[in-house]
Amino acid sequence: MNIIEVQGLYKIFGKQPDKALELLKKGYTKNQIMEKIGHTIAVDNVSFTVQPGESFVVMGLSGSGKSTLIRCLNRLIEPTSGSIVVDGKDVSSMSLNDLQVFRREKISMVFQSFAVFPHKTVLENAAYGLKIRGLSATERGQKAKNALDLVGLKGWEESYPAQLSGGMQQRVGLARALATESEILLMDEAFSALDPLIRKEMQDELLDLQNKMNRTIVFITHDLDEALKLGDRIALMKDGSIVQVGTPEEILMSPATNYVEKFVENVDRSRVLTAEMVMKKPNVVVRFPKDGPRVALHSMEEHGISSVFAVDKERRLQGIVMAEDALEAVESKQKDLETILRRDVHTVLPDTPLKDLFALLTGKSTPLAVVSEERKLLGIIVRGSVMAKLAERGTVND
Amino acid sequence: MIEFFIPLADWINVIFEVVNYHISPAMRSFSSFLEILIKQFEMTLLWPPESVIIIIVGLIIWRLAGIRLAIFAVLGLLTTFGMGIWKETMSTIALAVSGTIMSLIFGVPLGIIASQSDRAEKILRPILDFMQTLPSFVYLIPAVMFFGMGKVAALAATMIFAMPPAVRLTNLGIREVSREMVEAARAFGSSRGQTLIDVQLPLALPTIMAGVNQCIMMSLAMTVIASMIGAGGLGLVVLRSMQTLDIGMGTVGGLGIVILAVILDRLTENIAKNQEVRKSLNN
């Protein structure tokens, strides 16, 4: 089941949004409508769904309507038309009272400019949502403290925001949103105002927190690297419409339009692609301890390779057999692979990013083994295939 | 030749006659209630020996605004006592403070209403402009008509004169609170009232305090003019000296007003500043 379902959402800024909507549906372009009646189409027929526990990133340049879109989700901005269903409830038709209850219990928000209250202490800030929800002072104090611990602000409870750095202020903003324990977390360019080092730190911490808490996150950003890093799925916005929705790989590997392609061509792919995406299926393996040197040598000759991985009955990686060792063993009439099996094989996990593979591959003639956490052999990586994958998209662009 | 004449003066007179006739009785009782309050306040200030008042005022100001202003206040009050205008000074304080309190009681809520609704602001703005630019002597007349000569009429005139800055600056202060702050409050489900009390008013406080400060200054200024309709106090000292061309006595009355003005101005300024400091420092 989807936790957020947005269908045909429009937001038009101007005095007669209905008239503009009519024109838009008749096929007028945004520029024509702007010229004709001076209305801005901020969100244009947007539909998407978000699953529970998913990190959904909406990414676009400034003016693409992404901030308006996220504010429609909790109706800080009233949508012009369309439906927003959160957890089975229609947000767009809620009364003011229901809406306030919805905001208190279901959804919380982190802002680009932090928006922490300067006249409240760090603890009071973190407890704000709980205070509005009507919790007693002791109860909300406890929960707010826990949230502050989570974001690493233990010991700062009695300070005022003015005494904190930007990064720490945003941690307060994050703690305020986490303290309410709402299922959905809206993050509007939450890290954009931070300097790069702090931003990276916060991204990593958010990923960590997300692993522990598994909230549904809708994250707005203009930074593609951030989107690729944080998003389970990414929606790319342009001029108020969503151009493409997909996993980071889908966006990178098969951009839907020229616009998306332009957008992603500057991404350092080696940071996004993973071992899993460049590995080859291990067609040739020898069984250890069942197979002998002769079998190993034979399959290497057959496939024209100079080494072969050895696995046990459960396909767990045992080591690698080199062609020259196998040849020697056959000549000296050895029966098993025990003596020639090299066990110091370099292994990587399937989600290891490509950039970490280069160092492991440099100056080695043997391929890398991609193994699962249980050391099951999943695939092999040779240098050539990594380079090929990196070059692959380059040629498409040219 | 075109004959064109707007008999505004006649219209206003007729309107006031009618209004005055119908609401006069109610006004009289309200008026006598206010009169008792101001008189009580004045008597409270005059009842203990002067030295006691000076010491108490000194201590309060020391607590609120520091030792320097406290010393100035004590010396200033001693000067008024020395010049023989103690009674008038106390009377002026009573009227100015009552005027300020009444102005704030009406002004701050009006400012809050104006900040919450653009329509209310649109309606209030010309009224405030009118109240502020109309020469203050003009509304001495209706004040007397409604309340009769005396302190209550003076209080009413003071309110009309001193209320606009309180309304304006309250409205401005609340509207100036950044959109993101209000958005954050709303995003967590705050109602309008909760947003106002928890976020907007505390953040608008420095601006509101500037309004309070203005309000006090204008009340004080008005007490001089209002001496013409029976406000008494230092204004009366100045008025009499004007009528008798007694420059010496005029200076004494004027100096008394200046001393009060400086004390009250610095006091409110310091209270506002202390709140600021508390915000940015750890307790």
Image (tube, coloured by chain):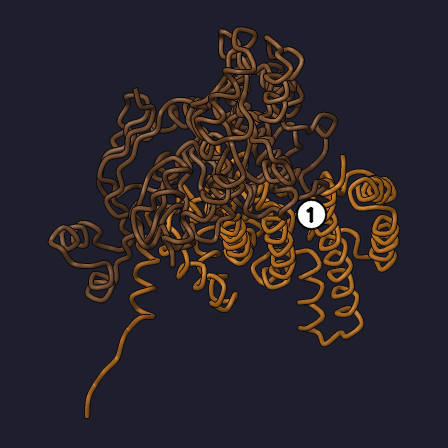
Chain colours: A brown, B orange
Dot 1 alpha-carbon crowd within 10 angstroms: few under 14, some 14 to 19, many 20 or more: many
The residue pinned by badge 1 equals: B272
Coordinates of residue B202 in the picture (x, y in percent):
59, 40
A279 relative to B13, above or below:
above
Q: Is residue B22 visible?
A: yes
A364 relative to B169, above or below:
above
Q: Residue at x 57, y 36 (%)?
A: A203
Nearer to me, A257 or B252 = A257
Residue at the left extreme?
Answer: A26
Total numbered badges shown on the rendered structure? 1
Which amino acid type is shown beneath numbered disc 1?
Ala
Nearer to me, B273 or B22 = B273
Nearer to me, B243 or A183 = A183
Q: Residue at x 86, y 57 (%)?
A: B79
Coordinates of residue A41 in the picture (x, y in percent):
27, 53
Residue A274 lies left or right of residue B245; in this view the side is: left
Residue A335 lies left or right of residue B81; in this view the side is: left
Point out the image quarter for the C terminus of chain A: bottom left
Point out the image quarter for the N terminus of chain A: top left
Coordinates of residue B262 in the picture (x, y in percent):
75, 58
Q: Residue at x 69, y 43 (%)?
A: A165
